[in-house]
Each structure stands twice: as structure tokens, then as C-alpha cells.
Amino acid sequence: MIDYAKIELPVEVGARLLHHPALSFIGKFDHATGAVLGDAPCIAEYGPRTAIGRTNDTATDRRALQFIVYPSGRTILHGSFHKYAQGGANWGDYTFTQFAATVAELCDTFNLDPHMLRLLQLEAGANVEPPLRTSRTLQAIVCHREGHPFGPMRSSKGRSLGIVMERDQYAVKVYDKGRQYARPGELLRFELKFTKAIEPQRLGIYTVNDLLNPGAWHRLRARIMDIYGELFIAEPSIHLPRLNASQRTFVELARSPHYWQELNRGARHKARARYAAIVERFAGSNLKDALGRTLDAKLNDLLNVPLQASARGDVFTDIPAGYATPSGERFHGSVKVGIRSPRTSIVDDSSEGDPLQRTTEEQRLTGTATGVRRCLTCGRDITDQRPGSRYCSESRYGKDGKRCRNAGSNPRNNRLRSLQRIEREPLLFDHRPFVVAETMRGNASA
């Protein structure tokens, strides 16, 4: 799924990389200042005082990642993780576990911390076998959402491999991956490129380490499929002779992005529904649905998280048991640490009284099992109150009873709901011994 990335490294990393034996920098440069002394044409793109180095593994031709060290010390790493991992090509599948292994090796080789590798740009997508020939599939893709058109991709060796649609913060690329690498059969690449860091940040993805969390891949998959669902793809298999004049005119107009641009949001929604109804009645197949199912299934397959038990005491639980670096050391996959609090009672039933609160669900289960009904707020035994009572009686307990009812109905001051919200997320430690009910303090003092 993950392909190209542009990453900002800490300032102190740049000077260290200039001396790294695994990097070959272009042209002659001053090791002390990073100033480039050569006049190679490729250096001019970044200025005369910038050192550009590529990974130097001639045995596997792995030169897909490039380090750029600026005079200020700012260091950028950019390139394709997919190509780096697979010998300079990216026509095959690139799974979650392969990506995790690549990051582990890269960080081990260049002494990098994935938590400190801040993402500036990111590409994610998949290579799929389309239901039609790749060329016909590309021709059928018309526009995005409000009629934003696709254009030809920049040519490679005098030829354009596909189409691209650019928005303010991201771009969608769809192209013939099989043709790019002269592969047999049909192979289509659907790719979403985040050109601004704000887009992946909305998905909770800030650093390379965040990409080692399977949840990030789930969110990327959902975002890719959301944008795919917003595309208008004309159906090539519509049987035009069966359409009446109005339907035929509509189908022909819908093939142009300009038609969709002239419609307001409500009209576009109705036009999409009308087109879908025509496809259902008069088409032999549904290209958009078939390609969407194939793409979604491939993205799901790439998230091949191993089903293995978590190691005891391993609080980095988003990846079941971590990954091992080439040296055999443990490589934890997420900065989001903690263990999910077990859904057990936070009341010590063996102690006198109820010094701690417990969740509503737990109290209901306890009451069902023992026949004892307790106040849902403070846990006091209210079995002798009228049937159906859920809180302490105000007539019997005065202000304490009213406080219990208010706590149960006020979402902001409801301690039980606050605890439930806390327990939904992973926790660093068992919080239950530190939870003390203010209502019980008042009862004890009374």
C-alpha cells in the first residue's frame, strides 16, 4: 500500500548522514559544511550548496531512496519504500509486514528513530487486475465529485501511462502499471497521493512510526475507498439502442466533466442516481462496482497483520507482538502505548461498603446475578426501594439521593460515563485503585 514518501528528519541527522558509508553523495562536497563543490547538472535543482545522497546498494540496485541535506542542516528523505524493498520496482504487492520490515532495516542501517521521521507527503494505493482492459478502464474514468477532471500523467519516455486528478491537498493517479514495467496481462495502479501533511494528519498519521500501526492502514484504506466512491466512471457496457432519446442524451452528456461542473450539489446527486438506475437496467456489467470491490479486497489483503499472541508485558499492543529487526532486537510498531482496561468490576466486593464506582453494565450484571439492586451512581443497596428504582431515593437520603440522580442524567458530571470513555482507549496502567467516588466520601463522612 505505502509507496512514495517525503519525510523531514531531525536537523542533527543531516551532518551524520554526510559521513555514512551506505550513502553515495553526488559530486564533490565539503564534509564539514555540506557545501557541494561539484557542478553536476542534477545538483542545480536543489541549489549549489546542497548534498544529495542515494542509498548505495549496488548488489540489489536499491537506489530508490534519496537524502537531501541542506546547508541549514534540514534533511529530507524521499523516495519509494516499495521500490527500495523490491529492487527498484513496484509492480508487485507490498504488504504491511513487508513495510514494517523495510522501516526496521532502514532505521537500523541509518540509525533513525521512526518516531522522529515526520511525514510531509505520502502515497498509498494498490496494483489490481481490472475487470476490463486497462486502457478501456482508464478511458471510462470521467471526473471526481463536482466534475473535477482528470488529465494525462506526465509522460515517461515520451508516453503517458495514465491519468491524474489534482486537488488542493491530494491527487489521484490511475495508470497502467503493467505497461510501465512491460508485464504480461492487465495491471492497473490506483494511487492516492497526499501532497500536504494535513491530509494524513487528519487520519492520525504524523510520522513513519504511525504507519506501523495497522489502524493507520485501515484508515488509509477507508480514505482511498471514499475518494474512489466519489469518482464518476462511465459504464462502457450500456446498451444504447435500448435507451430512449432522453436517456441516450443524458448518458452521452454524462461522459463529459463539464456536464457535472454545471450542476449544483442536489442536481448532481439526482443525476448520479439516474445514471446508476440506467446502468442497473441497461448495462451488462458495472465497471465501477467491480473495480471497487477488487481494489478494496486488494487493500485488505495488503494488511496482512500476523495473528499471533501478544507477549506478556508488551504494552505496544497495536501490533500483536512487535517485529524483530535484522539483528533480532524487538521493533515496536506504534507510539500509542498501553493496555486496554479489562471490562471487570472496579468495586472490591470483598471489602466493606463500596469505596469505588463501577460501570452501569457491571452493576446490572451483578444485580441480575445476586438479586441485589444497587444505585447506578454510588452503588448503594436500593433493593428495599420501590421496584424499578435506579438511583437512591431523595425522600430517604435527601441531597445525596438527588445528587445520585443528577449524576446519572448530567453527561458532563457523570463519573460513570467519564470512566467508560476513559476505558475505551488503551491505558498506561490500571487506573481502578485510584478512582474514588466523591459521593461515597460524602456518605462516609455522614
Image (spheres, rainbow, N blue to C red):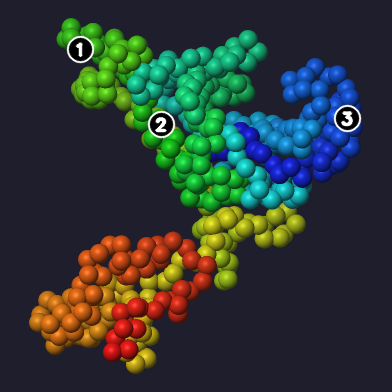
257 versus 298 height, above or below: above
Front residue of 203 and 244: 203
Residue 272 sits in which quadrant?
top left
Q: Name the residue carrying label 1.
A: 247
Q: Is residue 94 left or right of residue 61?
A: left
Q: Which amino acid type is marked by label 1? A: Gln
What residue appears at the point 30 percent right and 13 percent down from the top-left corner? 262
Helix, strand or loop at mark 1? helix
Q: Which amino acid type is marked by label 2? A: Ile
Instruction: Give the quarter of the figure containing the N terminus.
Output: top right
Instruction: Give the quarter of the figure containing the C terminus.
Output: bottom left
Front residue of 67 and 298: 67
What residue appears at the point 67 percent right and 33 percent down from the top-left corner? 78
Front residue of 331 and 443: 443
Q: Name the residue carrying label 3.
A: 29
Q: Residue furthest left?
A: 386
Question: Which numbered dot is residue 319?
Answer: none
Q: Nearer the viewer, mark 3 or mark 2?
A: 3
Residue 200 place in picture, x, y as percent: 51, 39
Helix, strand or loop at mark 2? helix
Q: Nearer the viewer, mark 2 or mark 1?
A: 2
Q: Residues within 10 Å of mark 1 (few under 14, many from 20)?
A: some
Helix, strand or loop at mark 3? loop
11 versus 311 height, above or below: above
Q: Name the residue carrying label 2.
A: 227
Asked if the residue under mark 1 is in contact with the one under mark 2, i.e. CB atoms within 8 Å, the reply is: no
Query: Sequence-wise, which precedes: disc 2 or disc 1?
Result: 2
Residue 420 place in picture, x, y as percent: 35, 66
Residue 61 visible in the picture: no
Query: Sequence-wise, which precedes: disc 1 or disc 3?
Result: 3
What residue appears at the point 46 percent right and 73 percent down from the top-left corner? 431
